Amino acid sequence: MKIDVGPLLVKPKEAVSLGDRPTRIDPIYASKDDYARTLAHHVERLEALHGRLYASAHHAVLVILQGMDSAGKDGAIKHVMTGVNPQGCKVISFKTPTEREARHDFLWRAALELPERGAIAIFNRSYYEAVLVERVHPEVLAAEGVTVANRDLELLFDARLRSIRDFERHLVENGAAIVKIFLHISKEEQRKRLLARVNDPDKSWKATASDASERKLWKSYRKAYETMLGATSTEAAPWRVVPADDKLNARLLVSEILIDALERLDLATPPPTAERKRELDEIRAALEHE
């Protein structure tokens, strides 16, 4: 079954209001068994497409996952990418910049982790944190050697958003496909998940004091996300807002978005050259006459 992900698209220069976008939609799956079958089919399809991506080596694929804490980024990676060959796929989780990273521009550390042609890189959070967390907590800019007056903060973040658009345009013009997904979770659903995390002995190690304190800044984060989504969703690298209150639904939507992105690429396995055909004939003959 083909899942329509068109309504999830953020149009270029759209005035984004997350309040107008649902965090929960009707289930795509008829039952949990149906979900499992659909996801398994998607995983199989992704594995095949990744094999062709790796063999053709014409394109790199950069997947960016953003969302509030507990929106389901880790789970989406675990369940959706489970069948992809790790030889051509890597996951990078960007934390607070190290001292070395903070001495460079905010895109530097991300550039070091970009995928080569034929590979997929998944950024679990990304350079977008520099226009999200740092907009909500501008005091952290000092650690990067950035000192600006409050009245100049908007100019700083406008410049960063422009740098991101230019950076992504450069990547696309050089053979990369960029898949950007915002997992859209409600404040109440986040509260339930954070509470479940605290109460689960196997997951409570993830709980931090900031889980509760950052919720007080929910409106500030939402505004930062709305600004970011509208300013950086382009024809070449659009954002998609995935309703994430239902984890199973979200995983099916994420996998469908990835399949669509890979299917749009020229992933035909390159035909063997005359020299390669001779080499294959020699290998075949050696094996057949052992």
Image (tube, grey):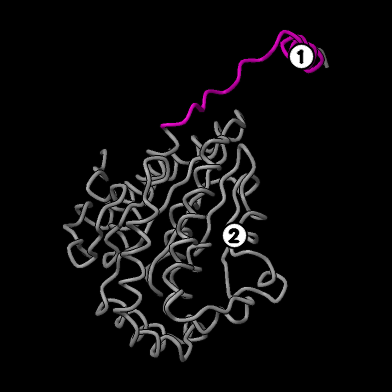
Residue carrying label 1: 288
The residue lying toward the viewer, choosing from 141 and 186, is: 141
- Give SS at disc 2: loop
Q: Is residue 265 magenta?
A: yes
Apparent side of residue 165 relative to residue 95 in the rendered image (left or right): left
Q: Position of residue 247 (x, y in %)?
A: 32, 64
Q: Residue at x 55, y 34 (%)?
A: 53
Which labelled disc corresponds to residue 93? none
Q: Residue at x 24, y 65 (%)?
A: 18
Q: Is residue 208 magenta?
A: no
Marks 1 and 2, how far apart at CA: 53 Å
Above or below, 257 against 192 in this view is: above
Instruction: Please state which amino acid type lies under the numbered disc 1.
Output: Glu
Q: How many marks?
A: 2
- Give SS at disc 1: helix
- Which stretch is magenta? 264-287
Above or below, 217 against 157 in this view is: below
Q: Position of residue 140 (x, y in %)?
A: 54, 82
The residue lying toward the viewer, choosing from 30 and 139, is: 139
The residue lying toward the viewer, choosing from 33 and 234, is: 234
Question: On the image, which quarter does residue 181 sit in?
Answer: bottom left
Question: On the image, which quarter does residue 116 sit in?
Answer: top right
Above or below, 173 against 97 in this view is: above
Q: Position of residue 81 (x, y in %)?
A: 49, 51
Instruction: Please state which amino acid type lies under the numbered disc 2.
Output: Leu
Q: Position of residue 137 (x, y in %)?
A: 46, 81
Residue carrying label 2: 107
Q: Residue at x 24, y 57 (%)?
A: 15
Query: Marks 1 and 2: CB-CB under 8 Å?
Result: no
